[in-house]
Image: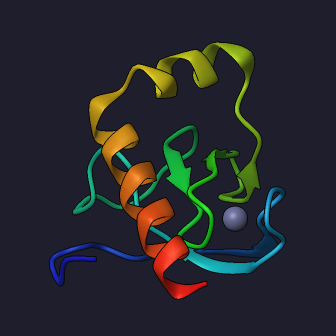
Amino acid sequence: MAASETRTPIKRTRCPNCEHRLDAAVVADNPTAQAKPDDFAICKYCGCVMAYDQFMRIRPLTPEEASVAERHPAIQSLVRMVRTRAEHDA
Ligand SMILES: [Zn+2]
């Protein structure tokens, strides 16, 4: 991850997909921005795409958001990057 990323502290939670503990996040489609509710978030361990709720907790995507994320080039390239790195670390 680039040094210019803005890490936003979030409520401690676990990734619903891989169950890694998450305590900070990067805004998937704008890495230098502070995360805000309804921004996309990506688990840095498994590449699972999620979003923030109004309390800055991780929540699953709605079906509409999931289809947006699937067609979002920046999100898809981040997901690929995370998954490639996860395979190398395994
Ligand atoms: Zn995960």
In the image: residue 90, left or right of residue 14: left
The residue drawn where x is 63% and y is 51% is: 48
Q: Residue at x 49, y 18 (%)?
A: 68
1 w.r.t. 43: above or below: below
Q: Quadrant of ligand 1?
A: bottom right
Q: Is residue 44 left or right of residue 84?
A: right
**Toward the viewer: 78 or 39?**
78
Residue 18 in the figure: left or right of residue 46: right
Percent x, y for residue 49?
A: 59, 45
- Residue 27: x and y in percent read 40, 55
The answer to whether residue 59 is above or below residue 55 is: above
Q: Quadrant of the C terminus?
A: bottom right
67 lies above or below 3: above
Residue in the picture at 28% in, 40% down: 74
Q: Is residue 40 above or below residue 57?
A: above
Q: Position of residue 36 (x, y in %)?
A: 48, 50
Looking at this view, is 22 or 87 the one in front? 87
* Image coords of residue 20 (percent x, y): 76, 78
Q: Identify the image quadrant of the N terminus.
A: bottom left
Nearer-the-camera pick, 45 or 61: 45
